[in-house]
Image: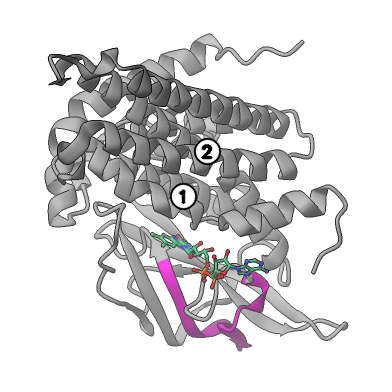
Amino acid sequence: MVDYRLNDEHEQLRLAARSFAQKEVAPVIGEHYEREEFPYSIVAGMGRMGLFGLPVSEEYGGMGGDYLALCVALEELARVDSSVAVTLEAGVSLGVMPIYRFGDQRQREQWLPRLASGEILGAFGLTEPGGGSDAGATRTTAELRGSEWVINGSKAFITNSGTDITGFITVTAVTGTKPDGRNEISTIIVPAGTPGLTVAPKYSKVGWNASDTHELAFDDCRVPAENLLGERGRGYAQFLATLTEGRVAIAALGVGLAQGCVDECLRYVEERSAFGRRIGENQAIQFKIADMELRTHTARLAYYDAASRMLRGEPYQKQAAIAKLASSNAAMDNSRDATQIFGGYGFMNESPVGRFYRDAKILEIGEGTSEVQRMLIARELGLPAE
Ligand SMILES: Cc1cc2nc3c(=O)[nH]c(=O)nc-3n(C[C@H](O)[C@H](O)[C@H](O)COP(=O)(O)OP(=O)(O)OC[C@H]3O[C@@H](n4cnc5c(N)ncnc54)[C@H](O)[C@@H]3O)c2cc1C
């Protein structure tokens, strides 16, 4: 039977996240955004709610929920603000999950309780200045010298990598050559503050302005050999799995943004008048809002479908790519239409839809561009790789 209604636990979480977003995020996030400030107190609040440990078992300080729970919370947060939502999204899907999925017992015990409580954030360094889509072309190297990895190279656009509470960055690096001549890629945990790791000043971005993003340089950066995450040479497979899962979370975030546009427009068209009547009485405006609702609803079904396949342990690569593509399209189209409906006020930074407009674009780029999603769907359909 197909049933995409949320169960009671997910519904309760949805209401709690909605209330938090409305009471704790909405009143202050505009100022953080304008000042490009990381919202530490909001992140601490999300930590107290257990949001960073949603899909982590209670044994490691988590909430013992599932990945859909994370998605539901992300959707409700992004309905109000995407900088806050992506801090949670990257914190869990890129920070927590690689340790939870691939870490050994010692690494899990060392990092997960503090990650799950929001005391520290983990980051994931895959993209390099030379390219992100072709992630297998990693140039950063890690050489095992005695009991230490010596890392050299750089990473670009790494979320949550330079906050006061960043605990570590998980880095992909070339650790050798495979018998077939291809690069052997492994994943290594680099604790924040390790000598040889330089965190560049934060980027000035078009959107997600209250989130934390940095370029990182590794110059003979040494970490203990036991900081290898999982098996040596499994880095490529690990990041593919991490990104597939993360796409579902990013899709939920995009659906939240798309829904936020519908929420804001429904309110605004009732209060704004032109030509002697409320603008919501114009069919042209109503049709725009109907299309926004259509995109939001179909993108939500797409991510519910991908998440339920993931939870049932079925292949879900194609569905994750479809969900991410549908959701980023919905976010872009809805934020453009919502800004249009708000007229001049939509172009003001103080209006939420102006913020949605700026925040939507990155959804077509991060965690695999829209072109990469189409490549993945085409491959799943059996079409030849280029
Ligand atoms: C705010 C922000 C936060 C980020 N956070 C993280 C993070 O935490 N960790 C991390 O590792 N990365 C992160 N990224 C990086 C992000 O994942 C990459 O920007 C993204 O994967 C694209 O890589 P690129 O920017 O190098 O673009 P490129 O790979 O250089 O691509 C450029 C363009 O060419 C297109 N293209 C490339 N190859 C093909 C092809 N074969 N066919 C058709 N089109 C193609 C792409 O779709 C794109 O439009 C973040 C980026 C931003 C902006």
Residue 48 place in picture, x, y as percent: 30, 32
Say whether residue 151 is magenta. Answer: yes
Disc 2 and disc 1 in contact, CB within 8 angstroms: yes
* Tally of numbered tags: 2
Assess disc 2: are there few (<14), some (14-19) or many (≥20) residues with their C-alpha within 10 Å of its C-alpha: many
Nearer-the-camera pick, 160 or 291: 291
Residue at x 17%, y 55% (from the top left corner): 37
Image quadrant of residue 209?
bottom left
* Residue receiving disc 2: 327
Assess disc 1: are there few (<14), some (14-19) or many (≥20) residues with their C-alpha within 10 Å of its C-alpha: many
Residue 131 place in picture, x, y as percent: 54, 75
Res. 151 visible in picture: yes
Image quadrant of residue 375?
bottom right
* Residue receiving disc 1: 363
Q: Which residues are magenta?
A: 135-157
Residue 303 place in picture, x, y as percent: 59, 32
**How far is the residue under mark 2 from the one under mark 1?**
8 Å
For badge 1, the amino acid type reads: Leu
For badge 2, the amino acid type reads: Ser
Secondary structure category for the residue under label 1: helix
Decide if residue 363 is on the left or right side of residue 119: right
Q: Quadrant of the N terminus?
A: top right
Decide if residue 375 is on the left or right side of residue 304: right
